[in-house]
Image (cartoon, rainbow, N blue to C red):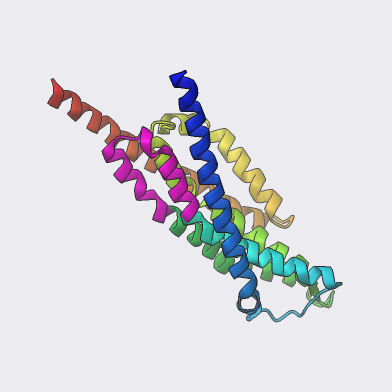
Amino acid sequence: MQEEMSVVEHLSELRKRLIITALTFIVFMAIGFTYTKDIYSFLVKDLDVPLVVLGPGDILWIYFIIAAVFAFICTIPIAAVQVWLFVKPALLPHEQKMTLLYIPALFILFVGGLCFGYFIIMPTVFSFLLSLGTDMFQEMFTTEKYFEFVMNMTLPFAVLFELPAVAMFLTSIGLLNPIALQKIRKYAYFVLIVIAVCITPPDFLSDFLVSVPLLLIYELSIALSAYVYRRKIKKAAQDIVENA
């Protein structure tokens, strides 16, 4: 009976954390709609190619997607706190303090991935693709297609840049270790390269520019997981000596 109540309590706690995260997303979504014009102006201020819409529905889609991405970014710290609060009872006091540090790291890495994709990868790929059509086409893009391109060049990096922090967090709570990451390295490489090919235009340069950073991120995840793993082993050994 006690075990059944424990499961019910855990489900209730999970439900509470999910509701808080969802409500936070909705609030930031409303704020995003308020500032959609300002965000849009920032994203297209350096664009020399005119953007057009093909119907009223496209305008609503642009508002929705900008507000949704804004809300997603702003919700990350809150969602991370909810995850931490959910797993906190199962952690030792020193683990609680250590894992709490991953919350700002998750947000910083996500924003860093966005900036890397937007300021480095996207301009390079965009300029290369435009150069292919020089003296052949008159460039005129729909706003929907342009923002799909922007998201394809930024959001995957933002999410995948989280891998090092996620690997460290899972290692710190005992759900992952660097040995497991090394064993699945070739499969992870394959998946990351497939992701790179899927989100980039069909040319080698774009695939290469996206694939290499993703592979380096995975290697960084292994290194950081190994660092946390060694510290855990050292801490466990010290505890055994002190309790002997």
Q: Position of residue 74 (x, y in %)?
A: 52, 61
Report the residue at 76% width, 80% height from top. 50
Instruction: Answer whether residue 23 is magenta in the image.
Output: no
Left or right of 46, for residue 137: right
Q: Which residues are magenta?
A: 78-105
Q: Quadrant of the C terminus?
A: top left
Residue 172 shows up from this direction? no
Q: Position of residue 84 (x, y in %)?
A: 42, 44
Q: In which quarter of the view is residue 126 placed? A: bottom right
Residue 149 shows up from this direction? yes
Q: In which quarter of the view is residue 51 placed? A: bottom right
Frontmost residue, 215 versus 143: 143
Q: In which quarter of the view is residue 118 placed? A: bottom right
Report the residue at 62% width, 40% height from top. 191
In this rendering, the answer to whether 218 lies above or below 57 is: above
Left or right of 1, for residue 173: left
Report the residue at 77% width, 69% height from top. 60
